[in-house]
Image (spheres, grey):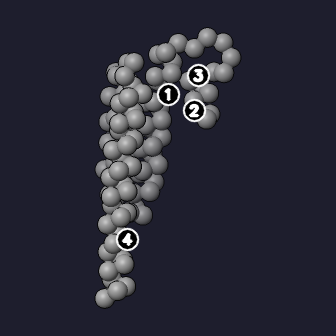
Amino acid sequence: MLLFANHCPPGGEVRAADVDRFFASSSVLYGVMFFALGRLYRGRLYVLGLACFVAAAVLMSAGSCASLVYGVWQSVAFAVISRHLARVARHHSQARGA
């Protein structure tokens, strides 16, 4: 919320370009978060963290399509995490059943 309020103040005029900058900043924050969580998931999130930094660079030049690019990127990132966690859960349930 604070990041959004920083780029798009609640009072006054807000240009569309100001809103688009939020998505790049948010992507950088997700990259930092994925890096912090990387060691918990045996390094797999380090790659997503790096990809978030690359996505931030792409989002800065995406212009009015930044929200769409950001949404697609977040969907892909969370689908990858979801797939990995489902695989880990399946592995652990098979290990308990054996």
The first of marks 2 and 4 along the sequence is 2
Q: CA distance from mark 2 to mark 4?
A: 34 Å
Marks 4 and 3 close (CB-CB < 8 Å):
no
Front disc: 1 or 4: 4
Query: Can residue 48 be seen here?
Result: yes
Q: CA distance from mark 3 to mark 1?
A: 8 Å
Marks 3 and 1 close (CB-CB < 8 Å):
yes
Q: CA distance from mark 2 to mark 3?
A: 9 Å
Residue 37 lies left or right of residue 12; in this view the side is: left
Q: CA distance from mark 4 to mark 3?
A: 40 Å
Residue 47: where, in percent of width, then height?
31, 50
Position of 28 relative to 10 (above/below): below
* Total numbered labels: 4
The first of marks 4 and 3 along the sequence is 3
Label 4 CA crowd tier, 10 Å (few <14, some 14–19, many 20+): few
Which residue is under mark 2?
Answer: 3
Q: Nearer the viewer, residue 39 or 82?
A: 82
Which secondary structure, mark 4? helix
Which three-letter amino acid code belongs to the residue tagged 3?
A: Cys
Residue 40: where, in percent of width, then height?
42, 64
Which secondary structure, mark 1? helix
For image coordinates 62% across by 34% down, the residue present is 2
Which residue is under mark 1?
Answer: 22
Which three-letter amino acid code belongs to the residue tagged 1?
A: Phe
Marks 2 and 4 close (CB-CB < 8 Å):
no
Which residue is under mark 3?
Answer: 8
Position of 90 relative to 39 (above/below): below
The first of marks 2 and 1 along the sequence is 2
Front disc: 4 or 3: 4
Which residue is under mark 4?
Answer: 89
Label 1 CA crowd tier, 10 Å (few <14, some 14–19, many 20+): many
Which secondary structure, mark 3? loop
